[in-house]
Amino acid sequence: QRAARAGLSPTTHPLYAQTEATDGEALPSTQPSLIIDGQAVLPPRLVGVAKLADLQRITRFENAALARFLRNPRLAFYARFYDTPQGADAGYRYAQPLYATTECIDCHAASQPIASTAPILPDDDSQFAAQPARSTPATSPAATSHPPLLGLVSVDIPSQISTRQLLLNRVFILTAGLIAGVLAIIIFYLVTTRLILQPVRVLQETAEKVSAGDLNIRSDINTGDEFQVLSETFNTMLTNLKNSADQLRAVNKSLDLKLGQLAESNVALYESNRLKSEFLANVSHELRTPLNSILGFAELLKDLVKDPGAAGAQAKAMRYIQNILTAGHNLLDLINDLLDLAKIEAGRMEVRVEPLSLSDLFEALGSVLKPLTDAKGLTIVPTIAADVPLIQTDPAKLQQILYNFLSNAIKFSPANATIELDARLVSTEGNGQSSGNADATSTPAAQRVQISVTDHGPGVPPDKHAVIFEKFRQIDGSVTREHSGTGLGLAISRELTGLLGGTIGLRSAPGQGATFYLILPLQIEPGAQDVRKRMVLT
């Protein structure tokens, strides 16, 4: 009917052919033929759902297909492969259901009732293949809302047609692949030769000439792609390389100067190594001396305890104990100096600022050093100007600095001499130098306090003024020197003065004694602890 509505005549259109009944089957007067490779092959069969008498002549395949479609209305098709015992008529058999849909009913002038399903011949399920059901199978058309089954259309396709078509497809694919492969090889060769190999050869020749020492050569590639970018980058590299070579020649000229500086550095390193060895020898000597005293007097004290009734035993015991205490204090001072230096270099030394009276500080220093001054008959003469106020500083660190000054003065002063301890206000100019008075026309300067210690010893040679403020350095660094010491006192004093925001200095001449002084602010300003190693030598 669709063909008729489309203007196709069953008698004239090639898709239709007249078919007669075979084996007593009642078939429609016209039924569509299957057209493959321009010829009709095995025309399809239309089978309707009718009475048992009408179903006597349908094939077992069609009967099985009807049974499947009745049981499962959602089944889209039913198919199987078949062959004969000789294998000559092998092929593919396919069946598709026909339902009375609304579209089909609309094509008819009047709807006819559909006969109910007649008994069906038993089907052989082992010989047929059907599409798996995608939902729960229906028991009968009347029990569901699915359109009634009118029948089915079946078609047989011989395997020779599929095999021939498959062979043609394979030949076509192989031929097309062979042609495409040959064309791809040709195109690849042309592209590789013109766009890759030729620029690479140019770069190779340029690189070989550069390796031979020619830095003036440049590559010339104008392909407009990455090779041109690579060529330009290569030329830039050659330019930079030439510039680097020129710079290298200039640097080589300065290497001679650097070599001289390196030689000086080697001398300095040698000197530093010598100083280290000297320091180790001095420290070992300084540590051994009080320890020997402690051990020696402890042995004497032990022998004295064995005979406590001996004449003068108590006086000897007190003298031995005093010597042990003195040696112990000397050893403790040495260890404290080493620890203080380690703290300063590690940046862990703290500054505790509080008000301080210089008169109280001078009195405390005199009491601490009295045993040393009495031993040599020395006199410490303190002098404090009347206008010196209380200062805001770290008392412990200032006392340690002055203790080092006075210890050196006691060590190097002759017997029965005088040591002067003086404090006064000074005006410090912008260059760090101090002046006793400031005239009315001078630039205003900050008021600071200057504390000095003057002895009448042998003095310090001018070339040794800076040396004695270095760590582990002394005027005489040998272990056989006349005066003991590690050379840490003045180095620690310089570091502590920097922490207090002050300046340390020395005025001395051979045979005229020495004056060590420090200039401190009346109050430590914020950030003053960051100022280190301030030193003035005169």
Image: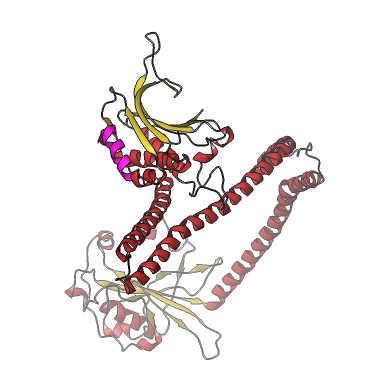
**Quadrant in the rendering for residue 171:** bottom right
Q: Nearer the viewer, residue 527 or 417?
A: 417
Q: Residue furthest top?
A: 441
* Residue 530 in the image, given as x and y percentages of width and height: 39, 36
Q: Residue at x 40, y 56 (%)?
A: 331
* Observer able to see residue 9: no
Is 43 placed left or right of 169 in the picture? left
Q: Residue at x 29, y 71 (%)?
A: 309
Q: Nearer the viewer, residue 273 or 242?
A: 273
Give the magenta range: 348-368
Q: Residue at x 28, y 62 (%)?
A: 104
Is 10 placed left or right of 363 in the picture? right
Q: Nearer the viewer, residue 167 or 236?
A: 236
**Quadrant in the rendering for residue 365:** top left
- Asked if 138 appears above or below 85 in the picture, the reply is above
* Observer able to see residue 84: yes
Q: Residue furthest front?
A: 311
* Residue 378 in the image, given as x and y percentages of width and height: 40, 39
Q: Nearer the viewer, residue 166 or 428?
A: 428
Q: Magenta stretch: residue 358 in it?
A: yes
- Quadrant location, the N terminus: bottom left
Q: How is the image coloured?
A: secondary structure
* Residue 53 in the image, given as x and y percentages of width and height: 29, 85
Q: Magenta stretch: residue 35 in it?
A: no
- Asked if 322 appears above or below 117 in the picture, the reply is above
Q: Residue at x 42, y 39 (%)?
A: 416
* Residue 511 in the image, given as x and y percentages of width and height: 54, 33
- Asked if 32 appears above or below 230 in the picture, the reply is below
What is the tally of numbered marks visible in this picture? Answer: 0
- Asked if 519 appears above or below 51 in the picture, the reply is above
